[in-house]
Amino acid sequence: MSEPSERWWENALDRLSAARARERAFAADELGDLLAAPSVAQLWKERVAASLVALALRERNEEAAESALNSLARSMERGWLPYPVVQPLTECLHRLSPDLVGYVLLILAGTRDPAARPVIERYSDHPDPTIRADAAEALEELP
């Protein structure tokens, strides 16, 4: 499959602002599928990632927020995103469900940036065992 055109990317990014949460979730999933492809240019990867981060920050619908975070996590499997692109996710950690906190911790660790360590370490003693386990796993990924 060839890389989509710039127009396709722009339309997909616009759908992240759709009125219905289900449409935003679908757009995030679709973008995540493409971000996981090895042929995506780093510039597009970072631009889309920044848009997915913005969606996760403003989204109040759990399904759409999870789609954005899942897409970011999957994109980290195929490549690297710089910490400054995903660092704004730390602003929403306090309001996320345990599952979504786990996504964010693993996304931060996926940057391989030592700057993520203090944020992740704060969750090592979290009362929720799922979050503690995710923090431990994330810390193992850091250099």
Image (cartoon, helix red, strand yellow):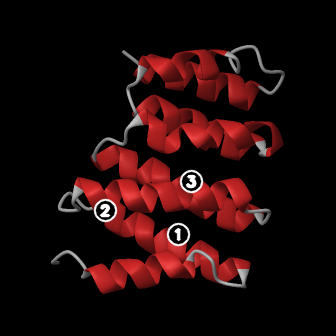
| Mark 2 vs mark 1: in front | 2
The type of residue carrying mark 1 is: Ala
Categorize mark 3 by other alpha carbons within 10 Å: few (<14), some (14-19), many (20+). many
Count up the numbered dots: 3
What is the distance, in whole Å, between disc 2 and disc 1 at their CAs? Answer: 14 Å
Could you tell me if the residues under marks 2 and 1 are in contact, i.e. CB atoms within 8 Å?
no
Find residue 47 and report its image quarter: bottom left
Q: Is 29 left, or right, of 25 in this rendering?
A: left
Q: Residue 44 bears which disc, if any?
A: 2
Give the x, y percent position of residue 15: 55, 81
Whether 105 is drawn above or below 5: the answer is above
Identify residue for label 1. 28
Measure how far apart labels 2 and 3 are at the Cα level. Answer: 14 Å
Residue drawn at 57 percent across, 74 percent down: 16
Name the disc covering residue 53, or none.
Answer: 3
**Among the two numbered marks 2 and 3 on one chain, the one whose residue lies closer to the N terminus:** 2
Amino acid at circle 3: Val
Mark 3 and mark 1 lie on one chain; the one further toward the N terminus is 1
Instruction: Identify the amino acid type marked 2.
Output: Trp
**Residue 97 image offset from top left, x and y in percent:** 78, 45
- Residue 131 place in picture, x, y as percent: 70, 29
Residue found at x 62% / y 42%: 89
Q: Quadrant of the N terminus?
A: bottom left
Q: Is residue 130 above or below residue 63?
A: above
Mark 3 to mark 1 CA distance (whole Å): 10 Å
Q: Position of residue 125 (x, y in %)?
A: 75, 14
Earlier sequence position, callout 2 versus callout 1: 1
Secondary structure at badge 2 equals helix
Residue located at (42% from left, 70% from top): 31
